[in-house]
């Protein structure tokens, strides 16, 4: 049985890997303006959109214009979603009569979906309406993923140009990301889910009689389409409150595999797309290798710990059979659930097929570390941007070690780029640790707060996880918090905003500044950035920054919980 479960895990990873290489080549062709498979279908649609909107997709922008367009359009989406959520009670497509959201909850939800995080302080089937799910949240799952992909495309363009000020058109990259990548893949995944039991309807709740003879009301809706883009766009928000542990959102082991491959495929493909676009395949393989080593160092221990189960229960002479199954679905098993817990945190998808709050303490630590490093695969587009910051740091450090001016792809990395990279690298731990410290201070000095159920080290882990998930644009949670309060809605909402857009602004600024510099041809003394040695340096930089920033907090949370076993 266990061998079968492990085979399923290997099969999911290999399927995503094998599909990602041709998909990466296709994405590179799309962003490079070359002919691609969907030109006859999507070309006229894109031209019609630009003609109606008055946007000149051929006008090239510099990096500042890219940022201006990106931030402006995201602000419009935020205001639209706030309106929808605070008025959904009287808007159409509300067959179950769900009420409108409070202002603070709508603020958190709108920001969360705009920034591709999908942190949910509400239960999907009862907290929003069909109109909100389709025209608010599912719409944002497309456009937020498209925003990240468009930002990555600009960085690709900046790295490709020898000396350039103009770096393509944001709106062109953005629209093509949706019409050529996200929408076609979502249609395929949605059809697979529909044929395997996931609903796709606008009808209200259905009455069913269980095997025990109880009559229950089951929520339905446009679930298959929502679940498809939530994984392909590395969004993660659940149509149902139980997310991908819900039997209609993820009915079987096959749909579990489909959803797993869906969330892996685009982050994988973007690494290979970079290699094809820049014609630097060895560099792409170096990046993918570093990411994969980091991923496996987190995933393998999690699988082992969840399969072995709780040692205290074993010590009592109780056979745990298939592993630690508390908080997990029998149809997936402990191995697949342990694997999912790292995939979803490494990739910043945030969907769950088991309760992370129930995993072993060190499994919880690895889930936290996956989000704290925030550089292994990552979300749609932004995974490359996060890794790009660490590449700049590694190039600068390596240059100092060999006594040469740091260079990356023919451009000198100087003080200005280094300062931006350091600010972005340190912003992530600053937001996580500051938020957690404020929450810990609040619960210590006002102990009447009812939102923390566990006062020990596990309760600290729950607070740390909430802010880590917010800062990493992940959206998953330990779920031991009563987080639908003004404090959690507003505090995490602010962190969501800062942790989404500043890490996009930083890499775009670095790429734009480097693109304007004079190109320096490679020489015998040029640092090679496509070698295993440089990959080790990049990995070391990521590990050192994470260890120095987060070890004290992890020692107070999951490590303390493990030692108390």
Image (cartoon, rainbow, N blue to C red):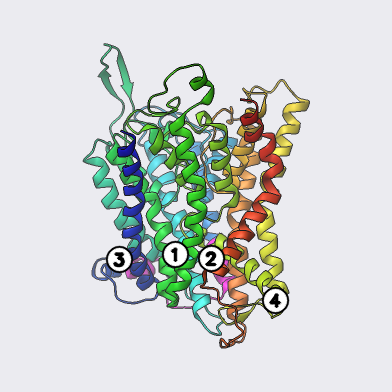
Residue 243, position in %: x, y? 41, 35
Callout 2 touching callout 3 (CB < 8 Å): no
Residue at disc 2, secondary structure: helix
Q: Nearer the viewer, mark 4 or mark 2?
A: 4
- Give the residue number, with chain letter if any, for mark 4: 414
Question: Is residue 62 one of those drawn in magenta?
Answer: yes
Q: CA distance from mark 2 to mark 3?
A: 21 Å
Sequence order check: which comes first, mark 4 or mark 2?
2
Residue 129 visible here: no
Q: What residue is shown at x 49% (from left), y 79% (from top)? A: 160
* Dot placed on the residue nearer the N-terminal end, 3 or 4: 3
Residue 438, magenta (yes or no): no
Q: Label 3: how many residues lie within 10 Å, few (<14), some (14-19) or many (20+)?
A: few
Residue holding disc 1: 271
Q: Nearer the viewer, residue 203 or 159?
A: 159
x, y percent for residue 142 = 41, 53
Which is more N-terminal, label 1 or label 2?
Answer: 2
Please name the residue that numbered disc 3 is placed on.
Answer: 45
Residue 419 vs 124, above or below: the answer is below
Q: Disc 3 versus disc 4: distance between alpha carbons?
A: 43 Å
Q: Are marks 3 and 4 in contact (CB under 8 Å)?
A: no
The reply to whether the C-beta atoms of the residues labelled 4 and 1 are less than 8 Å apart is no
Q: Is residue 454 above or below residue 92?
A: above
Q: Count neighbours of disc 2 (C-alpha within 10 A) and say few if under 14, some if 14 to 19, many if 20 or more.
A: some
Identify the mark nearer the N-term, 4 or 1. Answer: 1
Q: Which numbered mark, 2 or 1, is in the foreground of this view?
A: 1
Magenta residues (range):
46-70
> Magenta residues: mostly which secondary structure?
helix
Check disc 2 and report the residue beneath it. Answer: 69
């Amino acid at each position: 049985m266990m061998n079968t479960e492990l085979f399923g895990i290997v099969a999911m990873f290999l399927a995503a890997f094998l599909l990602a290489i041709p998909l990466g080549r296709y994405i590179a062709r799309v962003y490079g303006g070359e002919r691609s498979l969907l030109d006859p279908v999507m070309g006229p649609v894109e031209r019609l959109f630009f003609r109606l909107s008055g946007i000149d997709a051929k006008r090239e922008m510099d990096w500042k214009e890219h940022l201006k367009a990106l931030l402006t359009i995201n602000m419009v989406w935020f205001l639209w979603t706030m309106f929808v959520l605070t008025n959904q009670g009287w808007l159409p497509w509300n067959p179950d009569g769900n009420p409108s959201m409070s202002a603070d909850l709508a603020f958190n939800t709108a920001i969360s979906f705009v920034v591709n995080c999908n942190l949910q302080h509400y239960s999907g089937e009862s907290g929003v309406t069909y109109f909100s799910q389709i025209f608010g949240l599912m719409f944002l799952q497309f456009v937020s993923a498209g925003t990240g992909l468009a930002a990555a495309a600009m960085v690709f363009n900046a790295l490709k140009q020898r000396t350039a000020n103009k770096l393509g058109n944001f709106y062109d990259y953005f629209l093509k990301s949706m019409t050529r990548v996200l929408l076609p893949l979502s249609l395929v995944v949605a059809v697979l889910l529909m044929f395997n039991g996931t609903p796709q309807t606008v009808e209200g709740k259905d009455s069913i009689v269980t095997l025990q003879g109880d009559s229950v009301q089951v929520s339905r809706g446009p679930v298959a389409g929502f679940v498809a883009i939530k994984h392909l766009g590395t969004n993660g928000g659940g149509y149902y409150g139980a997310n991908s542990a819900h039997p209609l959102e993820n009915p079987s082991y096959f749909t579990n595999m489909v959803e797993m491959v869906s969330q892996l495929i685009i982050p994988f493909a973007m690494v290979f797309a970079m290699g094809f676009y820049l014609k630097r395949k060895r560099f792409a393989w170096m990046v993918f290798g570093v990411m994969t080593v980091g991923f496996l160092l987190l995933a393998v221990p999690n699988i082992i710990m969840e399969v072995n189960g709780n040692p205290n229960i074993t010590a009592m002479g109780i056979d745990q059979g298939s592993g630690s199954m508390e908080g997990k679905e029998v149809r997936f098993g402990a191995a697949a659930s342990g694997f999912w817990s790292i995939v979803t945190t490494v990739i910043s998808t945030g969907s769950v097929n088991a309760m992370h709050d129930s995993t072993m303490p060190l499994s919880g630590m690895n889930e936290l570390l996956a989000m704290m490093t925030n550089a292994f695969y990552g979300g749609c587009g932004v995974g490359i941007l996060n890794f790009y910051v660490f590449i700049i740091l590694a190039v600068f450090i390596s240059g100092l070690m060999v006594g040469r001016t740091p260079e990356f792809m023919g451009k000198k990395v100087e003080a200005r780029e280094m300062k931006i990279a350091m600010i972005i690298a340190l912003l992530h731990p600053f937001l996580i640790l500051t938020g957690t410290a404020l929450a810990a201070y609040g619960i210590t000095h006002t102990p009447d707060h009812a939102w923390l159920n566990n006062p020990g080290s596990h309760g600290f882990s729950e607070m740390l996880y909430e802010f880590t998930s917010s800062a990493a644009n992940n959206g998953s949670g330990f779920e031991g918090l009563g987080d639908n309060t003004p404090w959690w809605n507003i505090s995490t909402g602010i962190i969501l905003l800062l942790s989404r857009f500043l890490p996009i602004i930083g890499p775009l600024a670095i790429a734009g500044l480097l693109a304007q510099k004079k190109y320096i041809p490679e020489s015998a003394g040029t640092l090679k950035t496509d070698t295993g040695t440089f990959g080790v340096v990049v990995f070391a930089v990521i590990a050192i920054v994470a260890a120095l920033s987060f070890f004290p907090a992890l020692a107070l949370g999951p490590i303390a919980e493990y030692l108390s076993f």
